[in-house]
C-alpha cells in the first residue's frame, strides 16, 4: 500500500525561473481543517499549512508541488521518496523521530481536547468509547488509558462517529474541533479538561535529507523573526493560539 | 521478542476483543511470524460468524423471495424482482458503504413503533456495528443471489413431478414441502454451493468498507492488511490468509457435498450430479 | 463556475445547489466516474487477451504449456480475489524495484529488507524519484489494471476454453478433411464460432468486473468511492459549502450509477447474443433462420 500515492490533480505552483527542475514535493493529508483541507470551491489544497508551505518555499527559492496522501501511509511514502517533506499537522514525537527527522516546530505545542455530544458525562473520557484517527498521538494516548479506542482512518469519520452515537467522544487537536463545536449550535461540546500531548508541529523530512531540513529551518527562522508566521497563525487559528 | 506460545495465548482469541488476549496489537519491528499466524487465524472467527449466519438466514429468506418471484401475483413478483435486481446489480462494497451511512442516520434513541396500547421501542444503535449491520447487509445480499438461483430452479422443476403430486391429491403446503422444495434445492444445490463460497469470500469486505473495527477486532483479512501495512511485506500475510480461505472453502465444499448426497440419495449412482469446485467471483 | 457563486452563503437554495454541485471538488468527483469507465475499457480487452492466451494454453498439445495454463487459471481462481487485488500491486511494485536494483546497483551491500522497510537504491525507484504527479497516477492505475487483468483473465480463460470445446467437433474434422492445418482450422472455424458459446460466460464476467471496480478505492486511487466519502462527510463553516453528513446520498448516487451500468450491459449483451447467433448451429440461430431473419 505504501507505494501507491494519492495525488490530486496539478498542484504544481508556477515554476519560478531557473529552479524549475528542482521541484520539492510536499506531502499533506488534505482532511484536517484548518491545518490542511481541500477547498471545496476550487478543489485545491488549502489551509494554514498550504499557505505556510508556499511562503517557506518562496523564501527558500524552491519550486514546490503538493501531494495528497492518506494519513495512514504518509510517513512510509516520505521514506520511500514519493515526496520530500510532510506538512500535515504532524506532531514531533520520539517514536516518529526514529523513522524520520523534523524541522523546528512551526506551531507551538497545542492542547488536544475531547469532544462529545452536549450533555455527555465527562467521565466517558476515562471509561467510555473514544474515537481517534489511527496513527495519531491522540490514538496512542487513548490506547494507554482505560477507555475503549475506536480508530478511524480519516478525521472526518471520527466526528461522524460522535454525531451518530457510535462513540462517546473523540480526541483530536483542539483547533480542529473548535469549528465543529461552534457550528453545531449546542449539539457538540468539549468534555473534561484539555490534554497536552506532543511537542509542537513541524515538517517531517527524510533523515538523510539534511540539506532540505537546514533550508526549511532557515526559512522558518526568518518567518518567526519577522512576525509573518505569527500573523498566519492568528489568521487561521485565532487570537488565543500560543504564538512564537 | 515473544515466543510462539506467548503469541498463541496472546492473539488466538484477540479478534473477540481486547479482553481476550493482548490489549494492543503487535506493532512495527515487534511483529513475529507466529503473531501473524495466530492473529489472522483468530480473525477467521468473524469470517465464520458472518458467513454462517448469513447463509442460514439467507437460505430461508431466499426461499421466500424466490417463491414470491415465481408467483403470478404482480404484488409479489414485482417487489421480489426489484429486490433481486437491486442487490445483484450493484457492488456489495458500495452496499456496505450505503447501508452504514444510512444506519448511522437512524435516531439514536431508537424508533418507537406504536402497537395500540403499548409502544415498542426498537434500539437501532447495534446496526452501526459490523456484527449486526454488516451481517444484515450480507444477509440481504446473499438472499438476492440465492433467490435468483432458487427462482431458476423453480422454473426447471420437471413437469412430471408436479403432475405426480397432483395425481396423489397433494396440494398447498404438502405439495410444496414434499415435491417443490426438495426439487428446487436439488437443482439449485451446485450453484448454491458456489454462492456460499462467494459469500464467505465477501466477508473480507466488511471491515474494509465503512464498518469500524471496535477494539481492533476484525476478520482475517483485516489483520492481514494490518500486518502488510505495518511490515510492508506482502509475501507472508497475504499468502497465509489465502491459504486459510482455501481451507475454509474446502470445508464448505465438504459440508455442502454431504447435503448434496442427501438431496440426491433417491437417484441412481451415475445420475447424481457432482459438486464442482468453481469458486471465486467477487460481487 | 458561475458568476453568482462568489458568495454562496447568501444564495437562495437552488442557486446554492447549482454552485455546490459545480464546485471544484465536485468536478473531480464527476471525473472519477470516467476513471471507472476507463478502467473497465482498459481491463476488458487486456483480460480478454490474457483469457485467449490462457485458453489456447489449456488447449495446447504440448504438456508444459497446458500445465502452465492450468496452473494460472487454478491459482487465480483458488485465491480469494480481494487478496489478489491488494497483493499484486504491492508485490509487483517491489518486484520491479528489486529487479531494477539488481541491474542498476550491483555494488549495493546493504540488505534490501531492513526490519520493516524495503530499501532499494535511488536509481531503482519506480516511478523514478522526481516523477510528476501525473506519471505517478498513471503508474498506480497501471498496477491496478494488471491486478484486475490477471484475475479476470483467468476467469475469461476458463470460459473461452469451454467455448472452444463447444464448437461442434464435426466442423473441425471437416476442416481438417479439406486439408486445413490445426492452426488454420482454429483460426477459420473455431475462432469465429466460439463467441456465441462464450457469450453467456463473458457477460457474467463483465458484470462481475463492473461490480469489482469500486475496489480501486482500496488501492489508494481517487475513485468514485473516495470522492463520495470525501464530499459526503460533514463540512464545517470553514468550508465554502458547509453541510451536515450527506454520505448516504452520495452512496445512493453510486448505487444508481452501478445499477445503470449493469442494467445497460445486460441489455447490450442480450442484443449481442441475438446478433452473434445469426447463422449459428444453435437454437437461437435456428429460430432466426426459420423466421427468415438471416
Image (cartoon, coloured by chain):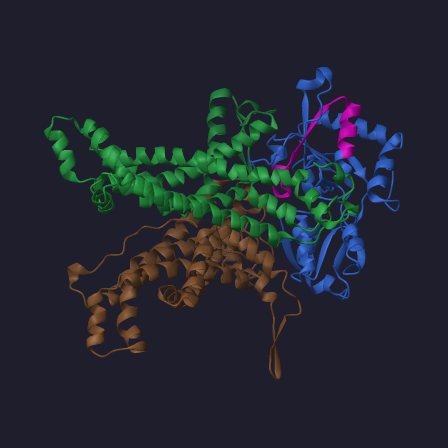
User: Looking at the picture, does residue B281 appear above or below residue C127?
Assistant: below
The answer to whether residue B239 of the structure is visible from this angle is no
Give the side of residue C109 with respect to residue C180, left or right. Answer: right
Give the side of residue C241 with respect to residue B282, left or right. Answer: right
- Display colour for chain A: blue
Image location (x, y in percent) of residue C6: 77, 38
- Residue situated in front as seen by the camera: A122 or C26: C26
Residue projecting furthest to the left: C177
Image location (x, y in percent) of residue C65: 26, 33
Give the side of residue A82 with respect to residue B94, left or right. Answer: right
Give residue A145's quadrant in the image. bottom right
User: Looking at the picture, does residue C178 appear above or below residue B276?
Assistant: above
* Residue A63 belongs to the span the image colors magenta: yes
The answer to whether residue C3 of the structure is visible from this angle is yes
- Residue situated in front as seen by the camera: B97 or B154: B154
Image location (x, y in percent) of residue C195: 29, 38
User: Looking at the picture, does residue A187 appear above or below residue B242?
Assistant: below
Predominant SS along the magenta part: helix
- Display colour for chain C: green
Q: Residue at x 75, y 32 (%)?
A: A53
* Residue A126 belongs to the span the image colors magenta: no
Q: Residue at x 76, y 29 (%)?
A: A54
- Residue situated in front as seen by the camera: B276 or B63: B63
Image location (x, y in percent) of residue C70: 28, 40
Q: Which chain is brown?
A: B
Q: What is the magenta range?
A: A51-76
Q: Residue at x 51, y 45 (%)?
A: C214
Amino acid at each position: 500500500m505504501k507505494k501507491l500515492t494519492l495525488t490530486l490533480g496539478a498542484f504544481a505552483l508556477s515554476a519560478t525561473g531557473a529552479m524549475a527542475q528542482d521541484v520539492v514535493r510536499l506531502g499533506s493529508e488534505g482532511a484536517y481543517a484548518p491545518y490542511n483541507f481541500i477547498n471545496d470551491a476550487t478543489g485545491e489544497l488549502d489551509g494554514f499549512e498550504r499557505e505556510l508551505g508556499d511562503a517557506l518555499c518562496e523564501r527558500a527559492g524552491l519550486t514546490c508541488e503538493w501531494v495528497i496522501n492518506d494519513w495512514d501511509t504518509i510517513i512510509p511514502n516520505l521514506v520511500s521518496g514519493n515526496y520530500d517533506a510532510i506538512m500535515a499537522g504532524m506532531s514531533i514525537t520520539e517514536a516518529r523521530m526514529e523513522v524520520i527527522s523534523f524541522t523546528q516546530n512551526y506551531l507551538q505545542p497545542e492542547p488536544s481536547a475531547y469532544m462529545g455530544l452536549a450533555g455527555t458525562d465527562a467521565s466517558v473520557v476515562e471509561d467510555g468509547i473514544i474515537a481517534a484517527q489511527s496513527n495519531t498521538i491522540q490514538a496512542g494516548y487513548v490506547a494507554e488509558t482505560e477507555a475503549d479506542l475506536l480508530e478511524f482512518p480519516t478525521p472526518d469519520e471520527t466526528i461522524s462517529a460522535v454525531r451518530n452515537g457510535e462513540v462517546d467522544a473523540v480526541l483530536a487537536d483542539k483547533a480542529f474541533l473548535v469549528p465543529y463545536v461552534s457550528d453545531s449550535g449546542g449539539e457538540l461540546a468539549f468534555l473534561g479538561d484539555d490534554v497536552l500531548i506532543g511537542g509542537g508541529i513541524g515538517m517531517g523530512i527524510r533523515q538523510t535529507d539534511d540539506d532540505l531540513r537546514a533550508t526549511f529551518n532557515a526559512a522558518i527562522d526568518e518567518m518567526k523573526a519577522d512576525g509573518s508566521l505569527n500573523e498566519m497563525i492568528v489568521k487561521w487559528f485565532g487570537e488565543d493560539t500560543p504564538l512564537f | 521478542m515473544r515466543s510462539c506460545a506467548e503469541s498463541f495465548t496472546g492473539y488466538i482469541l484477540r479478534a473477540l476483543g481486547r479482553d481476550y488476549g493482548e490489549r494492543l496489537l503487535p506493532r512495527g519491528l515487534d511483529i513475529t511470524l507466529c503473531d501473524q499466524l495466530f492473529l489472522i487465524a483468530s480473525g477467521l472467527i468473524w469470517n465464520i460468524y458472518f458467513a454462517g449466519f448469513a447463509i442460514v438466514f439467507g437460505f430461508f429468506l431466499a426461499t421466500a423471495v424466490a417463491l414470491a418471484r415465481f408467483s403470478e401475483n404482480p404484488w409479489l413478483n414485482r417487489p421480489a424482482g426489484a429486490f433481486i435486481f437491486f442487490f445483484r446489480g450493484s457492488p456489495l462494497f458500495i452496499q456496505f458503504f450505503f447501508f452504514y451511512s444510512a444506519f448511522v442516520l437512524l435516531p439514536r434513541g431508537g424508533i418507537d413503533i406504536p402497537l395500540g396500547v403499548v409502544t415498542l421501542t426498537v434500539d437501532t444503535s447495534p446496526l452501526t456495528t459490523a456484527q449486526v449491520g454488516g451481517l444484515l447487509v450480507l444477509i440481504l445480499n446473499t438472499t438476492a443471489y440465492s433467490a435468483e438461483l432458487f427462482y431458476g430452479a423453480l422454473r426447471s422443476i420437471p413437469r412430471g413431478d408436479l403432475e405426480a403430486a397432483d395425481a396423489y391429491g397433494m396440494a398447498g403446503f404438502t405439495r410444496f414441502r414434499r415435491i417443490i422444495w426438495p426439487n428446487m434445492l436439488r437443482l439449485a444445490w451446485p450453484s448454491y454451493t458456489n454462492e456460499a463460497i462467494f459469500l464467505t469470500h465477501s466477508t473480507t469486505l466488511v471491515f474494509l468498507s465503512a464498518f469500524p473495527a471496535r477494539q481492533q477486532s476484525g476478520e482475517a483479512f483485516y489483520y492481514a492488511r494490518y500486518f502488510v501495512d505495518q511490515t510492508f511485506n506482502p509475501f507472508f500475510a497475504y499468502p497465509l490468509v489465502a491459504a486459510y480461505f482455501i481451507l475454509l472453502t474446502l470445508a464448505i465444499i465438504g459440508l455442502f457435498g454431504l447435503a448434496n448426497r442427501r438431496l440426491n440419495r433417491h437417484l441412481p449412482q451415475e445420475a447424481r450430479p457432482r459438486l464442482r469446485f468453481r469458486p471465486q467471483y467477487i460481487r | 463556475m458561475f458568476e453568482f457563486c462568489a458568495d454562496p452563503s447568501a444564495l437562495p437554495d437552488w442557486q446554492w445547489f447549482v454552485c455546490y454541485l459545480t464546485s471544484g471538488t465536485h468536478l473531480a468527483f464527476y471525473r472519477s466516474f470516467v476513471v471507472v469507465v476507463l478502467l473497465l475499457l482498459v481491463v476488458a480487452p487486456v483480460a480478454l487477451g490474457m483469457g485467449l492466451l490462457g485458453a489456447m494454453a489449456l488447449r495446447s498439445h504440448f504438456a508444459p504449456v497446458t500445465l502452465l495454463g492450468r496452473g494460472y487459471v487454478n491459482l487465480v481462481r483458488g485465491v480469494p480475489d480481494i487478496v489478489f487485488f491488494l497483493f499484486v500491486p504491492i508485490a509487483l511494485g517491489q518486484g520491479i524495484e528489486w529487479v531494477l536494483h539488481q541491474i542498476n546497483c550491483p555494488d549495493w551491500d546493504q540488505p534490501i529488507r531492513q526490519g520493516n522497510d524495503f530499501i532499494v537504491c535511488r536509481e531503482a525507484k519506480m516511478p523514478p524519484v522526481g516523477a510528476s504527479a501525473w506519471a505517478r497516477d498513471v503508474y498506480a492505475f497501471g498496477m491496478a489494471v494488471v491486478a484486475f487483468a490477471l484475475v479476470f483473465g483467468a476467469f475469461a480463460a476458463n470460459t473461452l476454453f469451454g467455448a472452444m470445446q463447444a464448437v461442434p467437433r464435426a466442423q473441425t474434422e471437416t476442416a481438417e478433411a479439406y486439408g486445413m492445418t490445426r492452426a488454420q482450422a482454429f483460426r477459420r472455424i473455431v475462432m469465429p464460432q466460439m463467441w456465441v458459446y462464450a457469450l453467456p460466460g463473458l457477460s457474467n464476467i463483465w458484470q462481475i468486473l463492473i461490480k469489482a471496480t469500486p475496489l480501486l478505492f482500496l488501492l489508494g486511487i481517487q475513485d468514485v468511492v473516495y470522492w463520495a466519502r470525501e464530499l459526503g462527510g460533514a463540512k464545517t463553516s470553514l468550508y465554502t459549502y458547509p453541510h451536515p453528513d450527506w454520505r448516504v446520498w452520495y452512496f445512493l448516487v453510486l448505487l444508481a450509477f452501478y445499477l445503470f451500468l449493469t442494467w445497460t450491459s445486460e441489455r447490450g449483451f442480450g442484443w449481442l447474443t441475438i446478433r452473434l447467433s445469426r447463422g449459428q448451429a444453435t437454437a437461437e440461430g435456428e429460430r432466426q433462420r426459420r423466421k427468415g431473419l438471416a
